[in-house]
Amino acid sequence: MGWLFVIFVFLAPCSPARAVAPSVLFQPNTESYELDLHLDLLEDPSGDLNFADITAPASENRFTTNTTKKPNWGFTSSVFWARFTPGNQFDPDQEWLLQLNYPLLNTVEVYLPDGSGGYLMKQIGTSLPFQAREIKNRHLLVSLSQTALSGPPIYLKIRSQSTMSLPMTIWSARAFIKADQNELLFQGIYYGIILVIAIYSLLLLISLRDISYFYHLLFIVNFGIFQLIMNGTAYEYLWPTQVWWNSHSLPIFICLSCVGTTLFTRKFLETEQSTPLLDRILLLVAALSLSACLIPFATSYAFAIKVAAILALVSICSIILTGSLCLARGYRPARYFMAAWSMFCLGIIILVLRAFGFLSNDAVYFYEPQIGSALTVILLALALADRINIMSGKAFEAQSRYRSIFEHATEGIIRITPEGKLTMVNPALASMFGYSSPQEVLEADLDLDQVYVDPAQRATLREQLFHEGVVKNFETEMYHKDGGIIPVTVNIAAILDPHGTIVHMEGIITDISERKKNEEMRLAKEAAIYANQAKSRFLAAMSHEIRTPMNGVIGFTNMLLNMEVQPNRRRYLELIKDSADRLLKIINEILDFSRIEAGKVQLEETTFLLGETLTPPLELLSLKARGKGLSLRWDIPTTMPGLTGDPARLTQVLINLVDNAIKFTKAGEVVLKIFEETRHHDQLTLHFTVTDTGIGLDEQQIHQIFEAFTQADGTHARHYGGTGLGLTISAELVKLMKGNIWVERMVDEQGNPTGSTFHFTVTMASSTGHDDQVTAHPQIHPPHSDLNLRILLADDESINRILVVEILHQFGWETTEVTSGREVLTELTQNTYDLLLLDLEMPEMDGFETTRIIRSREAGSAVHLPILALTAHAIGGYQERCLTAGMNGYLSKPFDPEELREKILMIINTQVVHDASASKPK
């Protein structure tokens, strides 16, 4: 508690006045006399004056009378001379003692009159061994004889590296002994409290192994020793022969007390988490205090005690500031903490007020600093106890939460001994492995080597666990109670005691069966996507590679059929054409199915008349039906209004159904009926039926008929041929049009199949009132067919070039052939053409890049070369790419000669109209 006393007494020097101090007068029944206001004082800065010098008459005026109670000069290197004069004869029946109240003065020489005009010198202080003292007491005492108290002045020479504090008292021996006994009783109680709290902290430290109690113990022990040094008890009982240590140890114990209290504050208030800045300040103060313990060994005591006092002041301020902040933030243990340090600060205040003379030396004030420090220690102990209660409450709460999590967790939780014996499992783990309860698992006394599907994996897990202390996301397989296999992940950690020995292992076992299934599904999905992409690439490539020779086969066959050939050869040519048409139909169906399956089919929205759209393809199918001896009849209401939808896809569905009916009908007829089912505002629902007298369907076939690669006749004979995709494509297209499709079987009275009726419905917007805008196709009026056109043909396939050149020659058009995009660009720089027929896939430069270069050359000019793409690619997206690149049209191979002619004339006519419009004056 006296840490700061050395600072305050240093800051408050006494103020002597030049006069003669009053004599000390004996008074009956008075057994103690404070000498503070009876002293004459002389400061000797050099320390060279001796007793003869100060008793010489010339030195009389150098003394000044002390007017301050408890005179002190703080830390000073000066030597002080003091004198007082007994005014009358003291009671000769009493033994009288002179006490210097500050027991840490280094050297005190007391000059006592010897009765013969001379002086006797007695020496006391901490610079002398304790046994050299005249009176063996912790206080600095000198025996005063009746001769010494006979009247002449008594002189004292004081030299000290500690505080120059000069309160003095004359005691009767009887009164001193009584006062000393009272003080010893108080000191016994005080140090008893300190000892009990120290033992309490030590026991808690041993049992709880909490570093907070070590820091608390460090503070208590060092602060207690500091108090023992301050009142002289340490020199009397602990190290009476260690003069140097007794004179230099005080700063060390002050600094160690600072270390203990700042580190205790850090841990107790948990400043590392709550107030990081103050935490760093406390750490810095602790480090500086610990370093300052070495100063007494390297420099003077005077410097060391000043440093220690400053560090004590900084420590107190830091602790109070930290405690106040934590208390303001509602940290419960800070209540006792702040109460404890408030008592400490109160003791310091009283110590300072008493040092300045504002308070008397009454026992209450004299002992309050120690009372305050005792209360501080007690309250800190209570604070630690309260913290234990809080921690116990938190531990109980955490245990409850853990138990709740343990009982209700969806993942298995286990505890295992280092030897591998299960000691605790939760219900989730028991359920995971097929047991009814955790108790059943424990009673089964499982051999963990038998639980792992691969015991070597358990050995690997244990090796990693014992080496690293933790295993994360270890995937393995374990046996279910019924023998099944469960894929699991294991996360487990080794729990160590303070000596680093494994106490047990705790971990979580997670059933990853669902994750494995999802993983397999994801991999299967990725494989399916990859396969689908590969299939799309394959179909695109095969479409291109098959259509290229098919273009030649069909084209040259048509040419031969247009010539005069012998009847039997014509029959062969017709068979070739029929086979080629069938192969082309198969290719188209496969491509359509692939596009539908990939979700790449998009419906168009255009206005059309149902009769004009369906009649031409139905007439062609009628020819096919008559070829088999069948009748194909259709009924399209003439009152049907114009519709808005995708006429091409609607036609494709009907053609597939009618063609399918013709295929599976040997005799009889096929009938198509169309009628209006419902009308709501402009939304019209149409119902289409295709009825045949064919082989019919059984119940199982009805449910499978719209599945891919399925036919009514599924036998090995495969009498009817085809891919089995037509109905699947029709069903998917109807779904895209938000319609429904189904089939009904027809039977006779005996239950024998007599045919089938296919139904489908679609809802389309009616365009009634706008029939003048409804056309099946936009009408282009071509120029005269004898128009002489110069056409540039670019294709790397020689067969395609021969065929196209021959067709164009029949139309009377001049053709120039090139085989690559670069040749196209070269040719266009040298000659002009009316049209460019451009294949998309060519070496060096494809059709898209060639078109972009041509259009970039034309930019800013009136020249615009019509470009028609001829390609074997028939999959979705190519037509859009062609138009985006700047081409005027698109025609897929194989194509009909007339179809090529109409496409060319349409593009030329469009260009003529565009040029005419551009040439008109504005």
Image: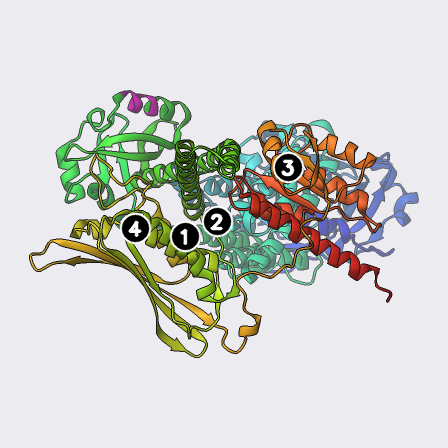
Query: Which of 6/487 is in front?
Result: 487
**As shown in the figure, which amino acid type bears the numbered disc 2?**
Lys
Does any portion of residue 883 appear in the rendered image?
yes
**As shown in the figure, which amino acid type bears the numbered disc 3?**
Ala
Q: Position of residue 537 (x, y in %)?
A: 49, 35
Q: Secondary structure at mark 3?
A: helix
Task: Choose mark 2 or mark 3, whichever is in front.
Answer: 2
**As shown in the figure, which amino acid type bears the numbered disc 1?**
Leu
The residue tagged 4 is 662
**As shown in the figure, which amino acid type bears the numbered disc 4?**
Ile
Label 1, residues with CA under 10 Å away: few <14, some 14-19, many ≥20:
few
Tell me how the rendering is colored. Answer: rainbow
Whole-angstrom CA distance, mark 3 to mark 1, is 104 Å
Residue occupying image coordinates x 50% and y 65%:
608
Q: Are marks 1 and 4 in contact (CB under 8 Å)?
A: no
Whole-angstrom CA distance, mark 2 to mark 3, is 75 Å
Task: Choose mark 2 or mark 1, whichever is in front.
Answer: 1
Q: Position of residue 748 (x, y in %)?
A: 11, 58
Q: Secondary structure at mark 2?
A: loop
In the rendering, which numbered label is found on residue 287?
Answer: 3
The residue tagged 1 is 620
- Whichever of labels 2 and 4 marks the residue nearer the N terminus, that label is 2
Q: Position of residue 255 (x, y in %)?
A: 63, 39
Q: Position of residue 440 (x, y in %)?
A: 13, 40
Q: Answer above or below: position of 497 versus 186.
A: above
Q: Which residues are magenta?
A: 456-461
Q: Is 623 placed left or right of 846 in the picture?
A: left
Query: Which of 344/920 is in front?
Result: 920
Q: Is 163 placed left or right of 756 in the picture?
A: right
Task: Choose mark 3 or mark 1, whichever is in front.
Answer: 1
The residue tagged 2 is 600
